[in-house]
Image (tube, helix red, strand yellow):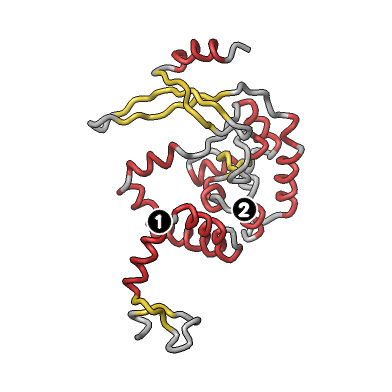
Amino acid sequence: MDDKHFYKNNKNGIDGYSSRCIECEKKRATQWRKDNRERWLEIRRNRNQKPEVKKQMRKDAKASRERGVQKRWQEENPERVRELSKNHRNHDITTTEWNNELRVFDYKCAYCDISEEEAKKRDKQNLHKDHIDSEGYNDIRNAAPACRGCNDTKWTFDMETWFREQPFFSKERLNKIIWWCTEGYKDYIEDKPPYRISRERVYNEDGSWNFIHTLWTVDEQRNMVKCIAKGKKKRDLDVFIKEHYKN
């Protein structure tokens, strides 16, 4: 009965250890998760909402990126990467809307204040459309221009909590982001149809791929909910759209 073979159990007043060895505890826990998946997911979601857990998750994620673990996993699991990318929440923002928002934010990252030109030189990328609230809307009311670094490190964490922990935190920029989400976007948001069209890669057995266009119903947040039509070209969906969305 030692720490190498048994987990600690403070409720056990006899010797302070669990009644099962570590290997048996792992098997029992694995089986319980399989039998009670919904309950396990609920417990995990509640645990991940705790500030101290979120802070540790950010540290672990940063350390993982620095060690190259994330990059190696992506290279070793291309199929899983493609599967996850399908579930990625893409913004439904027109070019005009985005250009107007960039102008409002002076063509700078809303968080660290780096300019788009500097971001291009450093990251070889334009400013990203970052979801301010990871579970919020998919249009400009929930988008902030962000450099690659801020977009990656913020991830799905609470925006204000994450921002206040950064060395470049600015109360002025935080207030501007909040203003944009509540009032600023109203002068620039455009009316959109009750559907969305996406383009996806379809991989063949030989590893080759081709694009297909899909038509989706959307919910209030502009999330793509149900695929209702597919076509090789975008124009292939026009007949279906005219028939089902006459107005």
State whether residue 202 is above or below residue 10.
above
- Report the residue at 64% width, 55% height from top: 163
State whether residue 185 is above or below residue 14.
above
- Report the residue at 40% width, 78% height from top: 7
| Foreground of the two, 37 or 131 | 37
State the residue lying farthest toward the left: 206
Residue bearing mark 2: 158
| Foreground of the two, 4 or 13 | 13
Residue 164, position as x, y percentages in the image: 66, 58
Residue bearing mark 1: 35
Q: Earlier in the sequence, mark 1 or mark 2?
A: 1
Q: Which kind of residue does numbered mark 1 sit on?
A: Asp
| Foreground of the two, 179 or 232 | 232
State whether residue 127 is above or below residue 33.
above
- Report the residue at 48% width, 59% height from top: 62
Describe residue 185's horizontal placement relative to residue 55 as left or right. Answer: right
Residue 24, position as x, y percentages in the image: 33, 71
Residue 83, picture quadrant: top left
State the residue lying farthest toward the front: 35
- The answer for how far apart the CA atoms under marks 1 and 2 are is 31 Å
- Report the residue at 47% width, 62% height from top: 60
Quadrant (top left/top right/bottom left/bottom right) for the N terminus: bottom left
Question: Is disc 1 placed on a helix, strand or loop?
Answer: helix
